[in-house]
Amino acid sequence: MAVFWRDARRSLTEPMYPADSSPLTARLCRMPAGVVVVEMRGEVDLTTEEIMRNALADGVGTADVRLLVCDMTRVSFFGCVGLTVLLRAKAVLRQRDAQLRVVAQSHPVVMMFDLTDLSDALGLCASLEEATGDQR
């Protein structure tokens, strides 16, 4: 079951994957200038990896995407499987001359980036404004 809603700050919102009872939900928002934001909420681990992968694949598959932002400000747990999903999305985006940036502030997410030294490689940003700043 998909959940739809309007967000006044963005021009179009897509379904939330999956229903609200899952430990991880994601929604895709298309913004001007080829910016696509995938907002994650909950826990990223082996049991929710497919949800994250599918949501990012939808973002990557957007025809005019120039920048894909994975907003994880509401992620409370982040396992290393999430890094694999992000690295795969980045590889596909690179082939399309597009970029990936990740927004995160919570300790579990930022710590995983710090431990693996992938903050720069995956474009870690502290806010959505920072991630989309030069694309708007």
Image: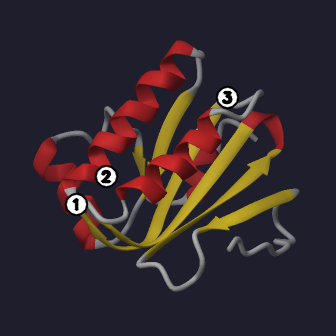
**Number of the front mark, 2 or 3:** 2
- Residue 82 tag number: 2
From mark 1 to mark 2, how far is it between C-alphas?
Answer: 6 Å
Helix, strand or loop at disc 1? loop
Q: Is residue 98 visible?
A: yes
- Residue 36 tag number: none
Residue 23, relative to residue 132: is it above or below? below
Residue 60 on image: x %, y %: 60, 34
Which amino acid type is shown beneath numbered disc 3? Arg
Residue 17, relative to residue 88: is it above or below? below
Residue found 76% across the figure and 41% down from its top: 136
Residue 13, relative to residue 132: is it above or below? below
Classify residue 106 by image quadrant. bottom left
Residue 79 on image: x %, y %: 22, 60
Cβ atoms under marks 1 and 2 closer than 8 Å: yes
Q: Nearer the viewer, residue 31 or 95?
A: 95
Which amino acid type is shown beneath numbered disc 2? Gly
- State the residue position of label 1: 79
Q: What residue occupies the far bottom of the structure in this picture? A: 21
Residue 61, relative to residue 53: is it above or below? above
- State the residue position of label 3: 66
Q: Is 109 on the left-hand or right-hand side of 52?
A: left
Residue found 20% across the figure and 52% down from its top: 80
